[in-house]
């Protein structure tokens, strides 16, 4: 498996932003590298084991320091795994996709780079994605 956040990605879900039968948008903290993976998929019948069938690579990564700070920033959320939560953390992170844009859909899975992203926490409690 190619590198996503590290050589051995083992993400534990820490924040669910969208989730329904046709889409997922979540942040997982990796037990291997202590960084994080952010994944967003929006099509039916997504099978994580069938890489060749993925039509989009909506994913990003955060490094260890950013992930630790992210955990603190989202601690204000009363229900991190509830994608219907309307708190400022959820509202801010749902408002825009992480940057930079993910690899093009033409990129083969094995070659698809996972761009690094960061976030900012505003004084109003809103958390937003930001570019490195
Ligand atoms: Zn990792
Ligand atoms: Zn929330």
Image (spheres, rainbow, N blue to C red):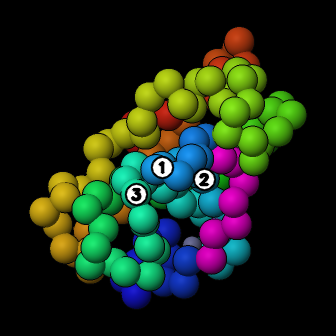
Among the 4 quarters of the image, the one containing residue 97: top left
- Is residue 124 at all visible to an observer of this figure? yes
Image quadrant in which the N terminus is located: bottom left
Q: What residue is shown at x 55% (from left), y 36% (from top)?
A: 119
Q: Is the magenta region chiefly helix, strand or loop?
A: strand
Query: How many numbered discs sit on the rendered protein?
Result: 3
Q: What residue is shown at x 33% (from left), y 78% (from top)?
A: 51
Q: Nearer the viewer, residue 29 or 39?
A: 39
| Relative to 38, 50 lies left or right | left
- Is residue 113 at all visible to an observer of this figure? no
Q: Secondary structure at mark 3?
A: loop
Q: What residue is shown at x 57% (from left), y 42% (from top)?
A: 18
Residue 130 in the image: above or below residue 106? above
Q: Position of residue 82 (x, y in %)?
A: 75, 42
* Tag 3 residue: 44
Among the 4 quarters of the image, the one containing residue 4: bottom left
**Farthest top residue in view:** 124
């Amino acid at each position: 498996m190619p590198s996503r956040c590290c050589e051995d990605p083992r993400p534990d879900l820490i924040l669910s932003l969208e989730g329904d039968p046709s889409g997922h948008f979540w942040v997982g903290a990796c037990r291997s590298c202590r960084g994080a993976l952010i994944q967003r998929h929006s099509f039916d019948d997504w099978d994580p084991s069938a890489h060749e069938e993925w039509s989009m690579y909506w994913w990003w990564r955060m490094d260890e320091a950013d992930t630790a700070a992210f955990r603190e920033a989202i601690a204000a959320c009363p229900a991190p795994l509830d994608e219907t939560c309307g708190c400022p953390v959820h509202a801010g992170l749902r408002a825009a996709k992480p940057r930079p844009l993910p690899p093009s859909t033409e990129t083969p899975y094995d070659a698809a780079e996972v761009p690094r992203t960061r976030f900012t926490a505003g004084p109003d409690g809103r958390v937003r994605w930001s570019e490195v």
